[in-house]
Image (tube, rainbow, N blue to C red):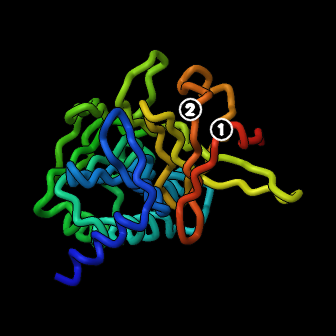
Amino acid sequence: MNFSLSRASLIAEADLVGIAGERAVCDRRGGLYFPDLRLLAVSDLHLEKGSSFARRGTLIPPYDTSATLLQLQAVIADYQPRIVVSLGDSFHDGGGAGRMHQSFRDRLEAMMAGRDWFWVAGNHDPDAPADLPGETVKELAIGALLFRHEPSKQRVEGEIAGHLHPCARIVQRGRSVRRRCFAGDGGRMIMPAFGAYTGSLNVLDRAYAGLFRLEKLVAYMLGAQRIFAISGSMLRPG
């Protein structure tokens, strides 16, 4: 009972956004939750990025998988989704799942237990992750929504995609603030990268050209305690 009250409070306090008629919660940690579907989407986990770099001789602190899984575990615990969709580049390369330490694998499988879990194929991980449950798909249609890794160049209503790692920048009172963000126009949404070691690309970059109706573009910037919905007219390059 306490848990369900906590989840209701989370959703009531969050800004519900509309995507092709479906209600969604943009969570400040980078997850997108659809309460009517009990569906959680995350994108670009890039698990085992640290070990991938190490194999090529670039040593970075090997904590990315642990940090990303801890955050994912917290989001799942808060919303208790029935369906989880990981929108591609879940692993930094095709061998990432095979390199994952058993303790991380156990933690991930515990999150997956009792849920419908979909791995959307990404450009970094086009094949099914080795020896992990869940279903690997190229794209996934649920109701009015279409989940895929890379956004389509043509207009697709209800498309939820990742790949571009969006961020937004604003300047107020002479201070510049740059944060990861969800980027949407009411018809489609591009999600921020969830992984601990992932970079970001400004939503005003030419890579986003034609993806949004600019007069309706909103960047839902990730803050420390909440999401900030910023009109596209306030955004700055860089």
Residue at 16% across, 52% down: 133
Residue at 45% across, 39% down: 162
Does 62 sit left or right of 111 as displayed? right
Q: Please state, as top left, top right, bottom left or bottom right, where the N terminus lies in the image.
A: bottom left
The answer, for residue 102, to whether it is visible in the render is no
Does 26 sit left or right of 133 as displayed? right
Residue at 74% across, 57% down: 177
Query: Sequence-wise, which precedes: disc 1 or disc 2?
Result: 2
Q: Please state, as top left, top right, bottom left or bottom right, where the C terminus lies in the image.
A: top right
**Which disc number belongs to residue 232?**
1
Q: Amino acid at mark 1?
A: Gly
**Foreground residue, 113 or 226?**
226
Residue at 53% across, 41% down: 183
Looking at the image, residue 58 lies above or below residue 147: below
Judged from this view, the residue extending furthest toward the bottom is 2
**Foreground residue, 119 or 192?**
192
Q: Amino acid at mark 2?
A: Lys
**Foreground residue, 9 or 179?**
9
Judged from this view, the residue extending furthest toward the left is 114
At label 1, counting other C-alpha atoms closer than 10 Å, the crowd grade (few under 14, some 14-19, many 20 or more) is many
Looking at the image, residue 77 lies above or below residue 152: below
Quarter-of-image position of residue 173: bottom right
Quarter-of-image position of residue 78: bottom left
Q: Position of residue 65 (x, y in %)?
A: 43, 64
- What is the C-alpha distance between the residues marked 1 and 2? 7 Å
Which secondary structure, mark 2?
helix
The answer, for residue 190, to whether it is visible in the render is yes
Q: Position of residue 180 (x, y in %)?
A: 59, 52
**Which disc number belongs to residue 216?**
2
Check contact, mark 1 vs mark 2: CB within 8 A. yes
